[in-house]
Image (spheres, rainbow, N blue to C red):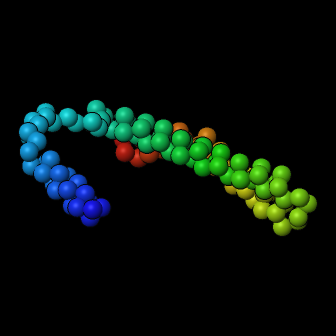
Amino acid sequence: MPFRALVLVGLVALALPCCAAAAQADTVVLAVAASVEEVLTNIRNWLMGILAGLATVFLTVGGVRRVFGGGDPGEQEKSKEAFKAAGIGYALAALAPLVVTVLKGIVGA
C-alpha cells in the first residue's frame, strides 16, 4: 500500500504544473545602478559588512578558545591568533571606504 501512495503522490506532483494556468508576470529588474559611484558605494558597504562579520566571528572564536582553553598554552596561543585576525579584520573594514575612494580615483567616478 505505501508504494501505491507514493506513486499517487508522484503523479499528482507531475500533473499539477501541467494543469496550472501560466502566470504572466511583468519583467522586474531588481538591480540597476544609476551610476558608477552607486556601484562603488554598494561595493564598499558589502565589503565593510563582510569584513566586520568575519572579524566578529574570529573575535567570538578567540573568546571561546580563551575561556575554554583552561590554561592550555596551545589553546591560549590559538586564541591570541584569533584575536589578532579579528583586529586585522576590523582594521580592513575601517579602511574599506579608503579603498573605494582609491577605486573611484582610478575609474574616474
The residue at 42%/38% (across/down) is 42
Q: Quadrant of the C terminus?
A: top left
Question: Residue at coordinates 37% horizontally, 34% vertically from top-left?
Answer: 38
Q: Is residue 84 visible?
A: no
**Which residue is the extreme one toward the front?**
1
Percent across and percent down for residue 62 are 75, 53
Q: Position of residue 64 (x, y in %)?
A: 77, 52
Please count the marks in the image: 0
In this rendering, would 28 be left or right of 108?
A: left
Quadrant containing the N terminus in the rendered view: bottom left
Q: Position of residue 57 (x, y in %)?
A: 65, 49
- Residue drawn at x 13%, y 34% as measured from the top left: 25
Q: Residue furthest bottom?
A: 74
Q: Position of residue 15 (x, y in %)?
A: 12, 51
Is residue 88 toward the left or the right of residue 13 in the image? right
Seen from this angle, which residue lies furthest right?
A: 71
The quarter holding residue 105 reads top left
- Seen from the viewer's position, the closer of residues 83 and 66 is 66
Q: Is residue 18 left or right of residue 41?
A: left
Report if residue 30 is visible in the image: yes
Give the camera-side residue of 82 and 60: 60
Task: Identify which residue, 50 or 103, lies in the foreground.
Answer: 50
Q: Is residue 45 left or right of residue 95?
A: left
- Does residue 74 sit above or below 23 in this rendering? below
Q: Residue at x 43, y 42 (%)?
A: 43
